Amino acid sequence: MTISPVGRLEGTVLPPPVLDVSGLTISYRDQSGTRTAVHGIDFSVAPGEVVALVGESGSGKSTTAQAIIGLLPENGRLDGGSIRLNLQEIAGWPQKRLDGIRGSVISLVPQGSGQFAQSGQDDRQTGRGNPCDPRQSLRRCR
């Protein structure tokens, strides 16, 4: 699947993308085997551009974002594709190296995080999940 940018003039020459995702394929292991959750997604983000991943529940939005920042759950696996950040391939980076850029160079705003910021409540007050509340330490988010 290729995500087409909205609002770009055809033929416009743009600087290299800040983020370029190509052919990203991600799977999860469970008791019954391996299941592919993301099938060859492609998109790029130009300097100054804002991109939102939008889709139905279970379509792979969070999985894609988690893979990009190196936070797939233990049973998740990046099966193929390329993730280039500022023209540098980061898909094979070890966690320690990703830790150095996560939060300062690239970040994830989880689904539903706005409702907690608006209400002034966090997971300690509500018992609900918002483990990456921006008011809390990034270390707690991992």
Image: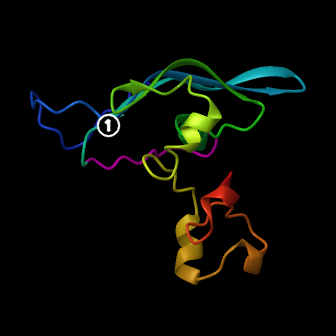
20 displayed left or right of 112: left
Asked if 76 appears above or below 99 in the picture, the reply is: above
Residue 70 visible from this viewpoint = no
SS of the residue under disc 1: loop
Where is residue 55 drawn, in percent x and y? 51, 44
Residue lying farthest right? 31
Residue 115 visible from this viewpoint = yes
Look at the image and give the residue range highlighted in magenta.
49-58
Asked if 138 appears above or below 38 in the picture, the reply is: below
Where is residue 101 drawn, in percent x and y? 49, 44
Neighbor class of circle 1 (other Cα within 10 Å; few <14, some 14-19, many 20+) is some
**Figure quadrant of the N terminus:** top left
87 displayed left or right of 105: left
Q: Is residue 55 magenta?
A: yes
Tell me what residue is drawn at x 79 percent, y 73 percent. Answer: 127
Asked if 95 appears above or below 24 in the picture, the reply is: below
Tell me what residue is drawn at x 62 percent, y 65 percent. Answer: 137
* Image label count: 1
**Res 139 quadrant in image:** bottom right
**Res 27 quadrant in image:** top right
At label 1, which amino acid type do we have?
A: Val
Where is residue 82 drawn, in percent x and y? 47, 21
Taken as a whole, is the magenta stretch helix, strand or loop?
loop
Q: Is residue 121 magenta?
A: no
Where is residue 128 drawn, in percent x and y? 75, 69
Q: Nearer the viewer, residue 127 or 104?
A: 104
Q: Nearer the viewer, residue 37 or 47?
A: 47
Residue at the disc numbered 1: 18
Q: How is the image coloured?
A: rainbow
**Res 136 quadrant in image:** bottom right
